[in-house]
Image (cartoon, rainbow, N blue to C red):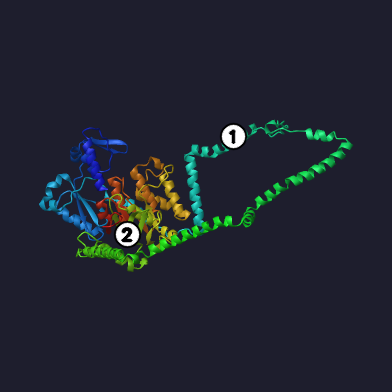
Amino acid sequence: DPGARHETWTLLQAEKNRRTILLTTHFMEEADLLGDRIAILAHGQLQCCGSGMFLKSQYGAGYHLTIVYESSSKSDLVTRTLELLSRHISGIHLQSVIGQEAIFLISAKHRTEVGDLAQERFARQNEEENVEVAEIDENAQFLGQLKVTQRLKGFPYYWQHVEAMFIKRIIFFYRKWIMFVMNLFFPIFYMALMVWTTTFVPSPTEQPSLKIDMSPFGGTSGSGYVLCSNYTDGSIGDGFDLYGSLRETTARLSAPSNLYIDTVQNVSAYVVNLIQQIGSRNFGIHYPLAFERQYIRLSSTNIRAFFNNFAYTTPPLAISVADSMLISNATKKNIVLEYDNWTLESDGEFTGEDSDVLAEKSKVKTMDINSSVVVVNDIKKRYGDFEAVKGVTFHVKAGQCFGLLGVNGAGKTSTFQMLTGENEITEGDAFVNGWSVTTDWKKAGANIGYCPQFDAVLKEMTGEETLYMFARIRGIPKKDIPEKVNAVIHTIGIGLYAKRQIKGYSGGNKRRLSLGIALIGLPPVLLLDEPTTGVDPKARRIIWNIFTKVRSLGTALVLTSHSMNECEALCTELAIMVYGTWL
């Protein structure tokens, strides 16, 4: 934006004493301000070199007289103006006619003929390369061929989309064949390598039985088995008799132990039985414990009741607390009343919204959305807690140009991103040709041509191939595509570069191509986000004239810009955007 540009100029001027600076620019003003010596390049060759004053004396175009008419300037009115000026100033001729603005060029050697009156009224501008009117008309005459009366629908439309994407992919792979080969053969090579490595994996075999030493887990004894196996028949009979007697004895001896075990398993029954047998000694211990528990519970109840009765047992303290609460509430109310007494009688000179902004909001709320091509009703955009756009409202009719002027970060691009469907609208709604952007985006988007702030092109494709691709996407019938693409190429003036890959384009030619993409099919609405950024003065004038011709065909324009001159030359209505809202 202009503010940041001038700050950058100040920084570069401060660094000139300590550094050697090489600067490229499209603006003679910037070159004249910063450059000690200026070189002019054209078609890859050095045309001239010298100081700013030397270049002005040798190649200076002279003075520019800018006349702004009340309505779009007509040829007869401009001709009469030129005849009138020629009577007083020699060597004056018409340079360009853009919208409501006509620019006349006065030769530097005839500047003495201007006179005091002309000096007061003539607008002196920075020198720019001369743009012939004939050249502008030659480029603009193809605009009439851009209009598309019939578009594809249904299956043919979507099939042409598939065809456009398939051709784009073929072109990309053809120009970047090394990447294509890597993408195709590297996965195949990787899979083959994986299969080959599996041959080195040993196959499963049956493992032999393992001998395990049980000594670490404890010993074994076989003596009982040996004794039993050596018993004779007689001893076995005796042994059974003896075993039986021992078993009975053992059972009798173990009875008390078994009784103990059974009792322990039912401890509750054992304790109750023991208490019943022993009698008063255990009761003497049991009941005091019960009375003690009851005593504690009674004490807790008494303490809780004491606190519940606190306000009644101590009335003076309760009254003091109540007084404190009343005084505190009264103080707060008194503060509020005191603030109200200092309310300003007016809103101030610079607060609130401008009357024109309020009138536009009122008009949009009551208007029919079909009466204008673009209707934006109080749209907002939030990114987390940050509100980038704070309720923007405007409308644009067919053949009008609405300009959004603002510095970097004002919210212009965010507004465009909502209108084009790139970002969702947080609140509000917008309508394009009667279709809602939030609910019917496909139908609304079909009526929009968009030139983004940053060029959205594939550098491996040529300009012509890019225009063909977008013509297919737009649904233009296949038989009409060559004519429409040729008209766009001649309109934007990239005939010399149309068959070159975009990676060899300059910044200005990329902007021209982005504009050409927006012009494909000449939709009812053009959204132009800083369309002339990085464009040289000659091309800028051509683009301005294209916009004027497009408006005459009934297309509505919505553009953002940093240049007040651009907005004055093109816009029928202008809004200044600051911090996401109209100023």
The C terminus sits in image quarter: bottom left
User: In the displayed image of the protein, which residue is found farthest to the front?
Assistant: 280
Residue type at mark 1 is: Leu
Q: Residue 217 falls in which quadrant of the image?
A: top right
Q: Is residue 218 above or below residue 316?
A: above
How crowded pointer 2 is (Cα within 10 Å; few <14, some 14-19, many 20+) is rated as many
- Can residue 464 be seen in the rendering of this structure? yes
Q: Is residue 420 above or below residue 361?
A: above
SS for callout 1: helix
Q: Position of residue 181 (x, y in %)?
A: 52, 37
Q: Is residue 418 left or right of residue 86?
A: right
Frontmost residue, 420 versus 100 = 420
Q: Position of residue 495 (x, y in %)?
A: 37, 45
Which residue lies at the image location 27% right of the left edge and 43% below the top edge?
Answer: 26
- Can residue 31 be seen in the rendering of this structure? no
Q: Position of residue 246 (x, y in %)?
A: 79, 42
Frontmost residue, 255 versus 52 = 255
Q: Is residue 573 above or below residue 35?
A: below
Residue type at mark 2 is: Val
User: In the displayed image of the protein, which residue is found farthest to the right?
Assistant: 234
Spatial distance from mark 2 to mark 1, Cα to Cα?
60 Å
How crowded pointer 1 is (Cα within 10 Å; few <14, some 14-19, many 20+) is rated as few
SS for callout 2: strand
Please name the residue that numbered disc 2 is placed on.
392
Q: Is residue 154 left or right of residue 456?
A: right
Sequence-wise first label, 2 or 1: 1
Frontmost residue, 276 versus 248 = 276
Q: Position of residue 446 (x, y in %)?
A: 42, 58
Please name the residue that numbered disc 1 is placed on.
193
Q: Residue 356 falls in which quadrant of the image?
A: bottom left
